Image (cartoon, rainbow, N blue to C red):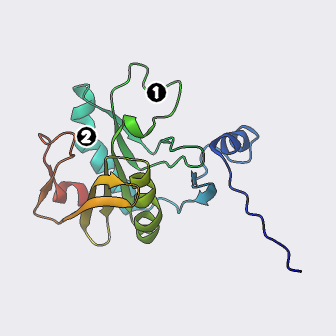
Amino acid sequence: MAAQLVIHRFTVKDYHRMAEAGIFQEDDRVELLEGEIVEMPPIGPGHASGVNRLLNSFLSLQGERKAIVSIQNPIHLGGHSEPQPDVALLNPHPDFYSQSHPAPQDVLLVVEVMESSADYDREVKVPLYARFGIRETWLVDVDARLIEVYRNPTPQGYQLVQRFQPGQQVSPQAFPELPLAVDDILG
């Protein structure tokens, strides 16, 4: 008789307890996705540059109090996922989410900058964001020099996918008045 394998999926609560117990250090690059603790690759110069360029582009929204610009901070997606997108635009919140991490209804946009994680971001993170109703996701592909924009989430995935290349402009759906040059984001 063959032994039955039992797979344990960690909950967000388990994940936080592990951090409190010192299993993870503050600088460890891990995130909880669908119950699995995933180690993220080190941040390369192209990735860091992309995040910094996006931050610079989105700072006007924060200054005007239209959105909180969150960099590599957790978003709470149910009991088994707490990804840390490279950039997130969040609905303004008086306490800046000091009592809990933002939930899907708080998120206006998530952006993942891809330098070595393109397949993982497309195949795992984008579908996860869609299932939880994140209204818009961008993948900034440093190597391919393009931005993929995902909109209209459903449990089966995003219904609208667009690609933007150098020479074009892209705006967050929540802020159509903020056109961003793809060249400025990609460098």
Measured along the vertical axis of the image, is residue 79 above or below residue 7? Answer: above
Q: Name the element at disc 1.
A: loop
Residue to which mark 1 is pinned: 97
Q: Tell me which residue sits at (11%, 60%) in the image.
A: 168
Residue at figure coordinates x 29%, y 32% from the top left? 67
Q: Quadrant of the N terminus?
A: bottom right
Q: Residue visible at 46% across and 56% down? A: 128
Q: Residue furthest top?
A: 94
Front one among 110 and 23: 110
Q: Disc 2 marks which residue?
A: 58
Identify the element where label 2 is drawn.
helix
Q: Is residue 96 above or below residue 104?
A: above
State which mark lies toward you, 2 or 1. Answer: 1
Q: Is residue 30 visible?
A: no
- Residue 126 placement (x, y as % from top left): 40, 59
Left or right: 99 as drawn, with respect to 183: right
Is 91 left or right of 187, judged from the image as shown?
A: right
Query: Of the residues shown, which amino acid type is indicated by label 2?
Result: Phe
